Image (cartoon, rainbow, N blue to C red):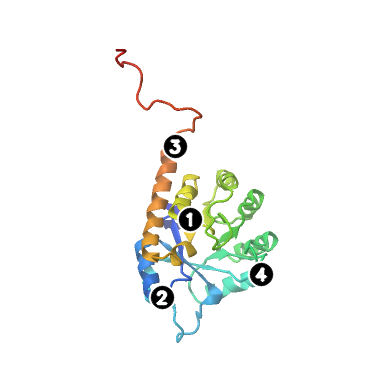
Amino acid sequence: MWKIRNQELESRLLLGTGKYPNFEVQKKAVEVSETNILTFTIRRMNIFEPSQPNFLEQLDVEKYTLLPNTAGAKTAKEAVRHAKLAHASGLCDMIKVEVIGCDKTLLPDPVETLKATEELLKEGFTVLPYTSDDVVLARLLEELGAHAIMPGASPIGSGQGIINPGNLRFIIEQSSVPVIVDAGIGSPADAAQAMELGADGVLLNTAVAAAQDPVKMAEAMKLAIKAGRLGYEAGRISKKRYAAASSPMEGMSQT
């Protein structure tokens, strides 16, 4: 078990809900992933319009913690407004702060992210800010009181995997709150690597939803995250320049 603020969780896989080919595939992928947390974009949901299709209607939402995100916001003011809309709908007090500063790379605006995080913390939200792999920015967000840090592995939806493992490791080592690698994961190998670096969790969307078989990929990611975490806890051997015999030399026959 692990915790985000007072929320106890078993699965270390957080799953996004966009880009699936249809609701049925989405439902099966969510179920096989065994995730505890589902994230979705507030602006892409008609949360106040019952006549509109809604993925939440396809799922037993009592089984999941919902994590609305503020994707689409360009300023702290917009992000705060989106968060308050989600709260007013009764969905959750947890929010993923996402304030995009560059339309080409979809990298977050560091100044507006800090502002939105500070404001939402004052409002009593459980705040999980999406950030770049900037070590100093991650520290500043934690110092503000963020309940988890969500650094990207690479640009959103790019599938490039972890392009700067050194920075991610620094962020993890300095953090006393959970670090959830978010954005850019493309394969189970990427997810396992994030966990082996010491991340507390991985948030995925495109890597599963846009896979040729999203249901199989959801299961693969689940297993990769479990394996990566076990590998981290077990402690890997150090890398050596030269070979080292796997069997002890003592006691071997000299003939």
Give the image quarter of residue 50.
bottom left
Q: CA distance from mark 4 to mark 3?
A: 41 Å
Q: Earlier in the sequence, mark 1 or mark 4?
A: 4
Q: Are marks 3 and 2 in contact (CB under 8 Å)?
A: no
Per the image, the residue denoted by label 4 is 74
12 left or right of 160? left
Q: CA distance from mark 3 to mark 2?
A: 40 Å
The one nearer the camera, 91 or 25, is 25
How crowded is the residue under tag 1: few (<14 C-alpha within 10 Å), some, or many (20+)?
many
Per the image, the residue denoted by label 2 is 22
Residue 236 is marked as 3
**Mark 4 or 2: the one toward you:** 2
The one nearer the camera, 146 or 59, is 59
Task: List x then y, in percent, for residue 161.
Answer: 52, 54
Q: Earlier in the sequence, mark 4 or mark 3?
A: 4
Give the image quarter of residue 65.
bottom left
How crowded is the residue under tag 2: few (<14 C-alpha within 10 Å), some, or many (20+)?
few
How crowded is the residue under tag 4: few (<14 C-alpha within 10 Å), some, or many (20+)?
some
Q: CA distance from mark 1 to mark 4?
A: 24 Å
Q: Amino acid at mark 4?
A: Lys
Q: Amino acid at mark 3?
A: Arg
Task: List x then y, in percent, for residue 158.
Answer: 55, 61
Q: CA distance from mark 1 to mark 2?
A: 23 Å
Q: Amino acid at mark 2?
A: Asn
